[in-house]
Image (cartoon, rainbow, N blue to C red):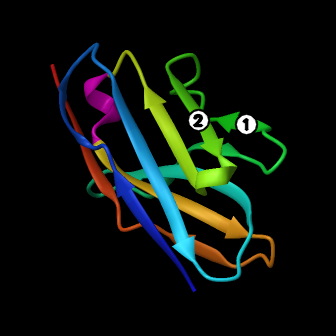
Amino acid sequence: QVQLKESGGGLMQAGGSLRLSCAASGSDFSLNYMGWYRQAPGKQRELVATISNSGSTVYADSVKGRFTISRDNAKNTVYLQMNSLKPEDTSAYFCKIVTARLNAYWGQGTQVTVSS
């Protein structure tokens, strides 16, 4: 079993920056894919960014050039650096990890609110 602990959400003015972290812990696992998703009230959960075990990244068009995903394999942690935040970035952000055995786990979510 893998547990995920997210941190770093909060309230920020438009144009500001926030950094989200998601640390994975548990026993007998190795990480494969890691990613961030977000879900606003009344909307479907959507992909924000992903990073593979080899470091390949994918970004939603809406965040390209503003958000950066990275990972620290030694700490089993994935980060999301969010710059130039916009009110439309307001959402609950969830991390997702997939282990080498292809088991998927979701974090509990952290709220990001961007005021105009």
Residue 116 in the image, given as x and y percentages of width and height:
15, 19
Tag 2 and tag 1, C-beta contact below 8 Å? yes
Q: Secondary structure at mark 1?
A: strand
If the image is split into quadrants, where does the N terminus sit?
A: bottom right
By secondary structure, the bulk of the magenta-drawn segment is best described as helix
Image check: 23 left or right of 73? left
Look at the image and say whether residue 60 sits in the magenta stretch: no
111 in relation to 25, above or below: above
* Mark 2, residue position: 69
Image check: 66 left or right of 109? right
Image: magenta residue range: 86-90
Residue 89 in the image, given as x and y percentages of width and height:
34, 33
* Mark 1, residue position: 57
Q: CA distance from mark 2 to mark 1?
A: 7 Å
- The residue positioned 52% from the left and 49% from the top of the image is 36
Question: Looking at numbered disc 2 in the image, what kind of residue is underneath it?
Answer: Ile
Q: Secondary structure at mark 2?
A: strand
